[in-house]
Amino acid sequence: MPRRQAEKVSHDNKERWLLTYSDLITLLMIFFVVMYSISNINAQKMAALASSLAQAFIGSPAPGLFEAGGLPSLVPGVAPAPGGQGTEGQSVEGTELARVKVELQQYIQQEGLQDQVTLKTEERGLVVSMADAILFPKGSAELTPAAHALIRQVGQALARLPNYLRVEGHTDNLPIHTPLFPSNWELSTARAINVVKVLMNDAGINPERLSATGYGEYRPVAPNDNEGDMARNRRVDIVVLKEAYNITEPHK
């Protein structure tokens, strides 16, 4: 009798592993379903965050990025940069800068200033470069009457733009040692400041949009090997900064 009971128990235990195996498979399936769900959520969050950052710093994301799945364009609580309008905003800004450039080119040609004032478009924005010979007496930061008229005309054209304006003073590499200007740093900075004052007082540009800096002889556009190239380096640049470069200017 005990032998028959033992055989019966042994026969019943042979099927118990199926229950354990079934439970294990079920748990594994649940585990992978949960992991898959979590990975999808994180992918969406990361894609949305990337899209939001692109909107905030450089406008709309490039075509082809994060198109699948209808991902949200912004992460809740993250707003684009003030005034940023993505590709459309950049296009409008480029059009306005081009329009002002054409207007200034016409003025420069009418006044015969092609050798004294140049315009160029750089990655950072529109640069109005004025030779020091038309702005200041040699070794001085005092603006001439002709300089006032020129800067006022340029400033009135730029006043219609919302962009920040950075005025940069530059010199050649000839040293200067005077009580007023111990070095080219002081001379270049003083010249930039005086140009800013005309833009503010005569052209009516909001001073919050203006900044002045002096680079001395350390940002030349040509080698200081001859008088012609040295004259090119003695200049004041008014840089109309594109919106993407506004971060380089101090904000409230």
Image: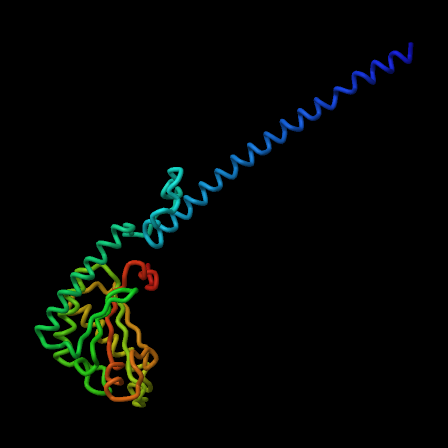
Q: Residue furthest top?
A: 1
Residue closest to the eye, 82 or 17: 17
The quarter of the rendered structure image containing the C terminus is bottom left
Q: Position of residue 175 (x, y in %)?
A: 32, 89
Query: Is the N terminus in the top left, top right, bottom left or bottom right quadrant?
Result: top right
Query: Which percent across, then down, holds residue 7?
Result: 86, 15
State left or right for residue 102 relative to residue 252: left
Q: Residue at x 74, y 21 (%)?
A: 16
Q: How is the image coloured?
A: rainbow
Q: Position of residue 87 (x, y in %)?
A: 28, 51
| Residue 241, placed above or below residue 57 | below
> Which residue is at 32% across, 90% downward?
177
> Residue 216 vs residue 115: left or right?
right
Residue at 19 percent across and 57 percent down: it is 95
Q: Nearer the viewer, residue 34 or 249?
A: 34
- Where is residue 225? Give x, y as percent: 30, 88
Identity of the residue drawn at 67% across and 28% down: 24
- Number of numbered tags placed on the structure image: 0
Please say whether residue 208 is visible from this viewpoint. no
* Quadrant of the image occupied by residue 130: bottom left
Does residue 121 appear in the picture of this structure?
A: yes
Q: Is residue 234 left or right of residue 108?
A: right
Q: Nearer the viewer, residue 220 or 28?
A: 28
Q: Residue furthest left?
A: 110
